[in-house]
Amino acid sequence: MNSPPAGPPASDLMADYYRLLGELLQMAWGDNFHLGYWEGPDDTSSVQEATDRLTDVLAARLRVGPDSRVLDVGCGIGSPALRVAATTGAGVLGITTTPEHVEQAAERAREQGMADRVTFQQADGMDMPFESGSFDAVLALESIMHMERPTALREMARVLAPGGRLVLTDVFPLAEEASDNPQAFGTLFGDAPVSEQDPGMASLARFEDWPDLVSAAGLRLDELTDITENVQNTFPRMLDGFIDRRREFERRHGVSVEQVLDHTRQANPVAAGCLVMAAHKP
């Protein structure tokens, strides 16, 4: 790939685009392609500790154990899936549209001796190749912001067994006056979109839209929590990481950091908050 498209990447270049974005995230941020969770302004946790903590926040809400089957929609290179399996004992299947991420995640599972309990495959989160009721829980760390939410939520509900739980994070637009707030962490860079129909981020849903979204999918809402204050350190730290590693990345790939991130900036240039949503299937 000699040069990326000037605007949103075309579908035939999307795999290369997100392969590069994933490599940039891994170089600048670490193995978790999601936000960090800090306990407060005095929390000096590292990025690794903070991103693992957000995984743990969601894992606790899954309420799964050794006999459970969990689906991770938008699994990145597998770190959350592996951590959920290690901390709960559950079996986990991670899906992503990026084949290189599937390969990398599977290799990590083998290296950690967990390939018998944690597997990965290429699949579309809005049209999953699984039978209805296949999973006890579904996890989605920021991946739903790349999908058409009503469709994705219905599909996640479909693959859940009765009584199964869906736990996810999503970003939402802050009040208009908050766009000038330096505490707002702004545009996010998450996992590749789970549907190949749209190579960028979907329109943001408002915080207050979520009860109706959940209900329309046939689920019952258990929790809707605003965690914006806990994740606000993510964006400035991520930008620092991009700056620190940009020369290495550009030397390796011949593509500028600005070019790789250009579409993400265009896709959602608004100040955004973050929420945790937990629901169950009746």
Image: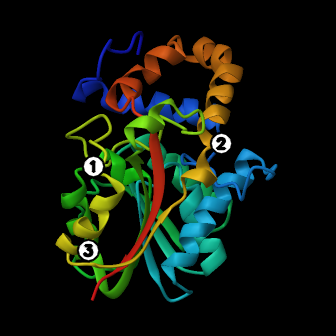
Which numbered dot is residue 233?
2
Badge 2: residue crowd in 10 Å (few <14, some 14–19, many ≥20): many
**Residue 249 point in image, percent of width and height:** 61, 20
State the residue at coordinates (27%, 53%): 124
Give SS at disc 2: loop
**Image quarter of the C terminus:** bottom left
Q: Tag 1: residue type?
A: Met
Asked whether, in this view, residue 261 is left or right of residue 97, the answer is right
**Residue 196 point in image, percent of width and height:** 24, 41
Is 173 above or below relative to 224?
A: above
**Residue 97 point in image, percent of width and height:** 34, 46
Badge 3: residue crowd in 10 Å (few <14, some 14–19, many ≥20): many
Q: Earlier in the sequence, mark 2 or mark 3?
A: 3
Q: Which residue is mark 3?
A: 157
Badge 1: residue crowd in 10 Å (few <14, some 14–19, many ≥20): many
Q: Tag 3: residue type?
A: Ala
| Inter-mark Cα distance, 2 to 3 | 32 Å
State the residue at coordinates (27%, 82%): 133
**Residue 192 point in image, percent of width and height:** 39, 41
Q: Which residue is mark 1?
A: 147
| Inter-mark Cα distance, 3 to 1 | 15 Å
| Inter-mark Cα distance, 2 to 1 | 25 Å
Q: Tag 2: residue type?
A: Asn
Residue 208 visible from this viewpoint? yes
Q: Earlier in the sequence, mark 3 or mark 1?
A: 1
Asked whether, in this view, residue 189 is left or right of residue 152, the answer is right
**Circles 2, 3 touching at the beta carbon (< 8 Å):** no
Residue 271 visible from this viewpoint? no
